[in-house]
Amino acid sequence: MSHSPQDPHPEPGRPTPEPQRDPVPGPPPRRPAGTIRLGSIAGADVLVTSSWFIVAALVSWIVSPRIEQVQPGIGAWKYVAGFAFAVILYLAILLHEASHALMARRFGARVTSITLHFLGGATAVEGEARTPKQEFWVAVVGPITSLAIGALGVGLWFLTPEGVLRVGVEGLAGANLLIGVLNLLPALPLDGGRVLKAGVWKLTGNPHRGSLVAGWCGRVLAVLMLAYPFLLGAVLDITPGVIDFVLAAVVAIFLLGGANAVVARARMMEKLPALVVRDLARRTCLVDSQMPLNLAVARAQAEQAGGIVTVDEQRRPVGIVSEAALLAVPEHRRAWMSVSEVARSVGPGAVLPVTLVGEDLVRAIGRSPLSEYLVVDATGAVHGVLSTADVDRAFRGTPA
């Protein structure tokens, strides 16, 4: 069970409860292929992957001998009862994920989907937690929900008469207690990993360091998971079967894949503070849009400018010269072309404030991918031109 940020950070000493805010509106996400929509919770689509039916069939097969034991002669109905148990189990997992979604929404985040899949469920939350407190509560509420359902199941077990119904109750109780405990293991991508991240973040003030620590713990847990079948024999004197080895491998691959993604993203995010628009923007030459291209290039070279912006009669910016388009024009033809022929009009998505830094810059570029952007100060005056090639070089740490 996990919740995944797509793709949220000052922490006061003891803040008062934050008021509920509506999630940021946005276009509805495209439903992934191979999923079925069941409805919505907290504004998020509830999806079931096709792999769930494989799990349901597997659960039916595993549970059927136990059902046959308590209800002899039930015949093929034991598989129907097993399937019903799989449905109830995943309803409990849905409650686990819904608790993540509701808590994230409580903190003002937008939840896009809740997906039930082969290994449980995942809640997709846009953005990152803004404080360690938010990270902690959005993560821990899932295992708490599972443990509460498990405890309720234990209580109901004593009140349920022997038979198929008691088998379902004991299975539901055991599964939820197991889900709750396992999800509290301090390793990403499990919920406990996010709790660990929140703790490291609180101590160090660095959310990315928290992700790195919890991600490495996830890698270690993935390796230990591979040893699970052998521990059955060494510790519990139980001979592991093929299913034990397959399950250990599947879970280890899931943990390792999630942990690797977390570590890679944390390392990437640590580089983002170096991306400062004010420093990366090129000095810009302002020219009339009808000026011959060769003269505009000559003026830019004289002013040691790395960008050319066309302006109208009121000296307002109207276009940004595309570096790629300029280089594609042979020098002998530049005298016969105006600057406007190699300039892109300045639309809303092409203008960036000079104050953008790090993650905010990456988000702004992601919303409107272009090769060049006009950078303006608080008064709207032109500060320079930002090239995405320069941003990429700064991120990779390579010289311009």
Image: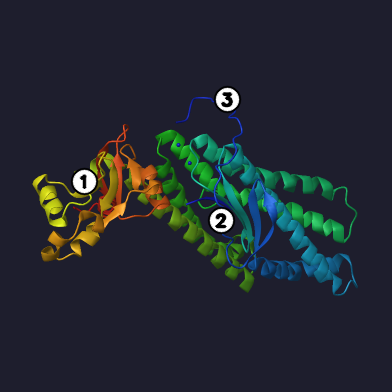
Q: Residues within 10 Å of mark 1 (few under 14, many from 20)?
A: many
Q: Residues within 10 Å of mark 3 (few under 14, many from 20)?
A: few
Q: Reading the chain from its start, which is encountered first: label 1 or label 2?
A: 2
Could you give the CA–CA distance between mark 2 and mark 3, rounded to whole angstroms?
33 Å
Find residue 29 and name its label: 2
Q: Is residue 125 left or right of residue 154?
A: left
Q: Is residue 201 above or below residue 308?
A: above
What amino acid is at disc 2? Pro
**Residue 11's x, y, as percent?**
47, 30
* Mark 1 lies on residue: 282
Q: Is residue 240 above or below residue 138?
A: below
Q: Are marks 2 and 3 in contact (CB under 8 Å)?
A: no
* Mark 3 lies on residue: 16
Could you give the CA–CA distance between mark 1 and mark 2, rounded to whole angstroms?
36 Å
The residue shown at (27%, 54%) is 396
Find residue 162 and name its label: none
What amino acid is at disc 3? Thr
